[in-house]
Image (tube, rainbow, N blue to C red):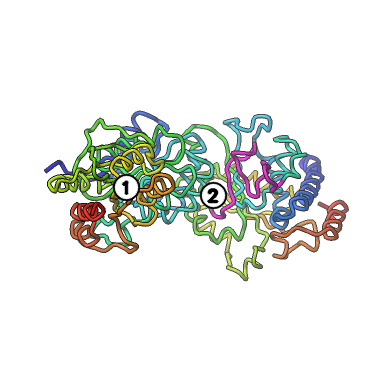
């Protein structure tokens, strides 16, 4: 079994690295810095660390103000609250002015587990993706999350980085990089393309192995850049294989599935199946139990792929 | 001495009110009530209080101003134009296609704006973040933020109010345009915000109450704010629609364009009136 690490650890490594490299980097927290781990940034750079308490709307406005003064604020709290509670602040005070604010949404998806539905971000990618000027990154492991933080630091304008709470298999080396608008073709295939992001990438890789034993050649794209989407890679692989399965720990409405089908439907239509949460809220349980309940598994990816090819 | 200087502001305020009327009339829509109530506050800030360079709008050591009640932008646009940020001839493009004078302020288009605003309740957080940034950059600029009184019903305002006192943002001054009327009616009928002084005091602010249409009163209040050790708020008692009797103290003129007859009557009243 590969190394398991929580992606949020990569976020913390990323902001620490960013803070050491660039003294314009500041961190804004909302009373979850010990949960996410960003408290260590505050210990190293106390004057560049603002814990504003439980106040997402204020956090995003403050970040906008700091960006107006030339700083690069990273605002981190749970994805449900940072994207949902403060959506209008993100829209008007950040995206409308195209400000250099980096928003970190922790606790993405039902994979959060025991905290249950209120804390499992399932709509964040959709509501961030629709905002003009916003970039959306959904890294698959801790190293890629670290890379996403460093890339966002050097990207002008707002970026939403979505990551998870619980350990996921390490896919990327520590020196991996993330490029805005670029996905990674992790495995080449000729029969079908699996397009995944976040915690579902490692499951897509497992699904590929199972499919391979059944004589099906599946390619795997890690679509870390959900917005802008890597259109070129997606269209190229979709046309080559003729079928796509999208896998994401998010509502089926509006997230990666939305981005993929919006891209393919007008000019490059191929059959597309979806493995995601079906218009419902999450529930408590271990991450494995909850993923099983919502069918966010390698086995589901396999069965959807097989059905699509029938 | 103070009186002599201040008397020069009265004709400017009158000119701003005439601009606002003409702009809204030309646009066919806009917000006269909350623009008129804020005129003296804006004129005092831009002619007496703020350290600015209109010919260098992005000067890093300038004082910052955030119009959190973005719908009062006709008054701000007039003040910026008359202060030299852009040609006053452009004022009549308000709200028109391709205009830099958007229905609510857009800093990416117009020089002199320190933020884009329009969604109520967000400006004070912006001002706090700017205040933090100014401190981190070791500048001595001050930050001013104009809030509407109806806007104080937004929870975001009070989150930011806590932040300002928690972080001792003493270079931040808020002005509440206390005109007592919001879109749907009197503030006290829609959603009471009193006791206002007690609320701000409880949030750790230095509070001073001023007559928002008196330059002498405003000047003294700003002077006090520049010396305090706390974030400061001026509760500026104002009259919604100030300067045009039929627009005063009524929600009807929150966001309405006058017809020809009303326009003529309003112009005449402002030209002949005290302010």
Q: Using the image as rendered, state which of residue B98 and residue A165 is in the foreground.
A: B98
Segment colored magenta: B94-121
Label pair 2/1, CB-CB below 8 angstroms: no
The residue at the point 28 percent across, 50 percent down is A245
Q: Which of the image's four quarters has the N terminus of chain B?
A: top right
Residue holding disc 2: B124
State whether the magenta stretch is mostly helix, strand or loop: loop
For residue B114: magenta? yes
Instruction: Indicate the secondary structure of the residue bearing disc 2.
Output: helix
- Asked if residue B114 shows in the view, the reply is yes
The residue at the point 80 percent across, 63 percent down is B246
Q: Position of residue B105 (x, y in %)?
A: 62, 46
Residue A99 appears left or right of A234: right
Q: Position of residue B37 (x, y in %)?
A: 71, 55
Q: Chain of mark 2?
A: B
Farthest-out residue, bottom: B189
The disc placed on residue B17 is none
Q: Using the image as rendered, state which of residue B119 and residue B214 is in the foreground.
A: B119
Residue holding disc 1: A33
Farthest-out residue, front: A310
Instruction: Indicate the secondary structure of the residue bearing disc 1.
Output: helix
Residue A183 appears left or right of B34: left
Q: Position of residue B83 (x, y in %)?
A: 73, 37
Q: Using the image as rendered, state which of residue A183 and residue B143 is in the foreground.
A: A183
Q: Chain of mark 1?
A: A
Residue A185 appears left or right of B92: left
Residue A99 appears left or right of A219: right
Label 2 to label 1: alpha-carbon separation: 24 Å
Q: Using the image as rendered, state which of residue A103 and residue A67 is in the foreground.
A: A103
Q: Position of residue B25 (x, y in %)?
A: 78, 53
């Amino acid at each position: 079994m590969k190394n398991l690490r929580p992606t949020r650890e990569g976020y913390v490594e990323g902001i620490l690295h960013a803070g050491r490299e660039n003294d314009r980097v500041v961190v804004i927290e909302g009373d979850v810095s010990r949960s996410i781990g960003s408290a260590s940034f505050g210990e190293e750079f106390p004057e560049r660390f603002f814990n504003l308490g439980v106040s997402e709307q204020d956090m995003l406005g403050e970040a906008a103000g700091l960006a107006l003064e030339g700083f690069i604020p990273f605002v981190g709290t749970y994805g449900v609250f940072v994207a949902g509670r403060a959506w209008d602040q993100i829209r008007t005070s950040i995206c409308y002015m195209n400000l250099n604010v980096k928003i970190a949404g922790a606790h993405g998806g039902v994979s959060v587990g025991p905290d249950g539905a209120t804390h499992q971000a399932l709509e964040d990618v959709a509501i961030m993706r629709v905002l003009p000027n916003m970039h959306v990154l959904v890294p698959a492991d801790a190293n890629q999350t670290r890379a996403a933080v460093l890339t966002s630091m050097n990207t002008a304008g707002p970026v939403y980085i979505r990551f998870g709470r619980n350990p996921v298999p390490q896919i990327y080396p520590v020196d991996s990089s993330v490029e805005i608008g670029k996905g990674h073709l992790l495995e080449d295939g000729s029969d079908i393309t699996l397009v995944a992001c976040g915690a579902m990438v490692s499951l897509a890789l497992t699904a590929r192995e199972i499919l391979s034993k059944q004589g099906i050649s599946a390619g795997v794209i890690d679509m870390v850049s959900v917005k802008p989407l890597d259109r070129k890679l997606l269209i190229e692989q979709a046309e080559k294989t003729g079928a796509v399965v999208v896998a994401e720990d998010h509502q089926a409405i509006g997230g990666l599935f939305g981005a993929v089908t919006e891209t393919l439907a007008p000019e490059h239509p191929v059959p597309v199946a979806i493995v995601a949460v079906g218009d419902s809220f999450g529930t408590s349980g271990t991450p494995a139990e909850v993923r099983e309940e919502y069918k966010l598994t390698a086995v589901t990816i396999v069965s959807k792929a097989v059905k699509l090819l029938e | 001495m103070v009186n002599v200087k201040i008397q020069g502001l009265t004709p400017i305020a009158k000119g701003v009110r005439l601009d606002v009327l003409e702009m809204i009339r030309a646009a066919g829509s806009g917000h006269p009530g909350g623009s008129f109530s804020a005129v003296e506050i804006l004129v005092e800030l831009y002619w007496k209080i703020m350290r600015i360079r209109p010919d260098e709008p992005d000067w890093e050591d300038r004082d910052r101003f955030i119009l959190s009640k973005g719908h009062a932008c006709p008054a701000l646009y007039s003040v910026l134009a008359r202060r030299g940020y852009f040609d006053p001839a452009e004022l009549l493009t308000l709200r028109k296609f391709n205009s830099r004078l958007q229905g609510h302020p857009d800093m990416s288009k117009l020089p002199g704006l320190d933020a884009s605003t329009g969604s109520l309740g967000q400006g004070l957080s912006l001002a706090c973040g700017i205040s933090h940034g100014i401190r981190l950059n070791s500048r001595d600029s001050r930050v001013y933020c104009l809030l509407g009184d109806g806007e104080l019903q937004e929870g975001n305002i009070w989150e930011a109010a806590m932040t300002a006192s928690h972080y001792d943002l003493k270079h931040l001054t808020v002005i509440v345009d206390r005109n007592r009327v919001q879109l749907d009616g009197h503030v006290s009928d829609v959603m009471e915000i009193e006791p206002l002084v007690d609320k701000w005091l409880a949030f750790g602010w230095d509070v001073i109450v001023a007559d928002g249409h008196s330059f002498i009163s405003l000047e003294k209040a700003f002077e006090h704010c520049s010396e305090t050790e706390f974030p400061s708020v001026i509760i500026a008692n104002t009259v919604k629609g100030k300067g045009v009797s039929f627009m005063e103290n009524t929600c009807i003129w929150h966001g309405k364009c006058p017809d020809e007859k009303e326009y003529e009557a309003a112009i005449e009243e402002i030209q002949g009136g005290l302010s």
